[in-house]
Image: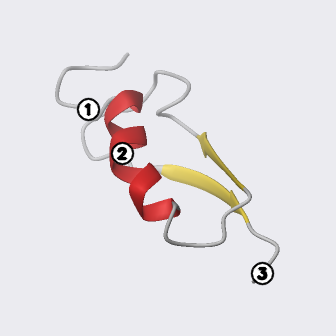
Amino acid sequence: MMTSSVISIKTIKEKMIPILKSYPVDKAILVGSSVKDEAIYGSDIDLYIDTKKY
C-alpha cells in the first residue's frame, strides 16, 4: 500500500520527463513497485528506457 511519504507517479513524471528529453530516448516506461502501488519508503524507481542510439 502506498503512503504519503512515497513519491507519486505524477511527481516521478514531472522530474523525469525534462531529464529524459535531454537524451535520445524513444520510450521510457515506469515499472516495479511504484506502478503496482506497492512502493514503500526507501523503494527505488525502476525505469525501462529504450533508445536506438546507445
The residue singled out by tag 3 in the image is 53
Secondary element under disc 1, as helix, strand or loop, is: loop
Amino acid beneath label 2: Ser
Badge nearest the viewer, 1 or 2:
1
Res. 5 image quadrant: top left
The residue singled out by tag 2 in the image is 43
| Of the pair 38 and 22, the residue shown nearer to us | 22
Tell whether label 3 touches label 2 (CB within 8 Å): no
The residue singled out by tag 1 in the image is 6
- Residue 31 shown left or right of residue 21 in the figure: right
As drawn, 52 above or below 50: below
Residue at the extreme top: 1
| Of the pair 12 and 3, the residue shown nearer to us | 12
- Residue 34 shown left or right of residue 3 in the figure: right
Q: CA distance from mark 3 to mark 1?
A: 33 Å
Coloring basis for residues = secondary structure
Tell whether label 2 touches label 1 (CB within 8 Å): yes
Q: First in sequence: mark 1 or mark 2? A: 1
